[in-house]
Amino acid sequence: MSITQQYLLDTYRARLHGEPEPPAPGRHDLDAMRELREYRRFRAVLAERPAHGRLRQVLERWLRPRALG
């Protein structure tokens, strides 16, 4: 069963029982991603690591040519 079919079934059941309809699929995805990002930044601060730019630092380390010698 696809997400859309499950949503339509849940909406139908909610209407039969007079309950509020569930949110549409994907409606809160951006909010969830923002909360996850904020949570990861918070955990980084607690662990005394930089909260910003960590991904960029890792990519620079991987992509920067190493000095021979």
Image (cartoon, rainbow, N blue to C red):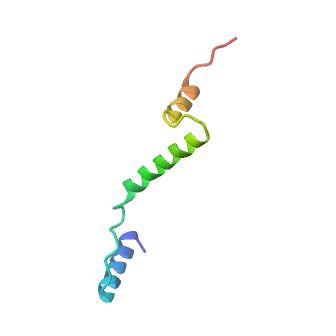
Q: Which residue lies furthest to the bottom in this view?
A: 16
Q: Would you place residue 14 above or below residue 51 in this image?
A: below
- Image position, residue 6 (x, y; %): 39, 75
Q: In which quarter of the image is the C terminus?
A: top right
- Image position, residue 35 (x, y; %): 44, 52
Is 66 on the left or on the right of 29, as rendered? right
Is 28 on the left or on the right of 43, as rendered? left
- Image position, residue 9 (x, y; %): 36, 80
Is 63 on the left or on the right of 26, as rendered? right
Q: Would you place residue 52 above or below residue 23 in this image?
A: above
Residue depicted at x 56% and y 45%:
43
- Image position, residue 51 (x, y; %): 51, 37
Q: How many labels does the image show?
A: 0
Q: Which residue lies furthest to the right in this view?
A: 69
Q: Would you place residue 53 above or below residue 5 in this image?
A: above
Query: Residue 57, located in which quarter of the rendered image?
Result: top right
Residue depicted at x 36% and y 79%:
10
63 or 13, which is in the foreground? 13
Q: In which quarter of the image is the N terminus?
A: bottom left
21 or 41, which is in the foreground? 41
Is 64 on the left or on the right of 34, as rendered? right
Residue depicted at x 58% and y 43%:
46
Q: Would you place residue 43 above or below residue 57 in this image?
A: below
